[in-house]
Amino acid sequence: MDITFMVALVIALALFFDFTNGFHDTANAMATPIATGAIKPKTAVALAAILNLVGAFLSTEVAKTVSGGIIREGSDAVPITPDIIFAGLMGAILWNMITWLKGLPSSSSHALFGGLIGAAIAGIGFSSVNVETLLQKVILPAIFAPVIAGIVAYLCTKLAYALTARHDPETGDKLTQKRGGFRTGQIFTSSLVALAHGTNDAQKTMG
């Protein structure tokens, strides 16, 4: 197969992966404010799209990790070919599509990493994988991120209830004030998630 055609095919496939990543993960970022009625669905999607685009230009660290951190390149390994990248992208896209159709929340990042690592091992061998970087930047964060996020969310929820609680003057019982600030806070925090998604996921395909 002509190398130019193969490269063009890989670029097109990478763009399609970004497309699946967008409709797959945008729902995750904006699900909470939409569910509570804090923001309309179309507005939420538009806001997420803008913030993902902005986030892609804030740094290049994730792109560097994908391009040369996890898959070993250079004198000590066979160069990564377009065929391997094609196979890795296909694996990630298929996983994104299956989990989207099943309504399962899933990480496009780890789907891409898994696809690229599997393709590199099949095409070159285990020596192509930088195990230390894989452990530090993929496996350990995948284990600790849900735990840390859960603890922080628990503490923030307790703090929010403590700050907004008031006493009923008749019974002395605590009541929680229903303020518009909660809705604004949901929109703000979900927007930050979308922005962070851009700084992370939008760069993976660049890498």
Image (cartoon, rainbow, N blue to C red):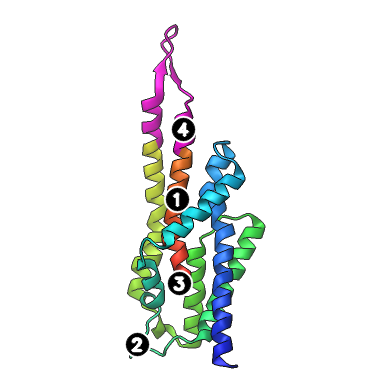
Graded by Cα atoms within 10 Å as few (under 14), some (14 to 19) or many (20 or more), the crowding at tag 1 reads some
Which residue carries the number 2 mark? 74
Q: Which residue is mark 3?
A: 206
| Residue type (three-letter) at the residue carrying disc 4 | Phe
Q: Is residue 144 left or right of residue 17?
A: left
Magenta extent: 157-185
Residue at image point 54% right, 56% down: 25
**Magenta region includes residue 162:** yes
**What secondary structure is marked by label 2?**
loop
User: Nearer the N terminus, badge 4 or badge 3?
Assistant: 4
Please tell me in which quadrant of the rendered image residue 13 appears.
bottom right
Most foreground residue, 144 or 92: 92
Q: Earlier in the sequence, mark 1 or mark 2?
A: 2
Compared with residue 25, is residue 204 higher up or lower down, i.e. above or below? below
* Earlier residue among tags 3 and 1: 1
Mark found first going from the N terminus, 1 or 4:
4
Q: Quadrant of the C terminus?
A: bottom left
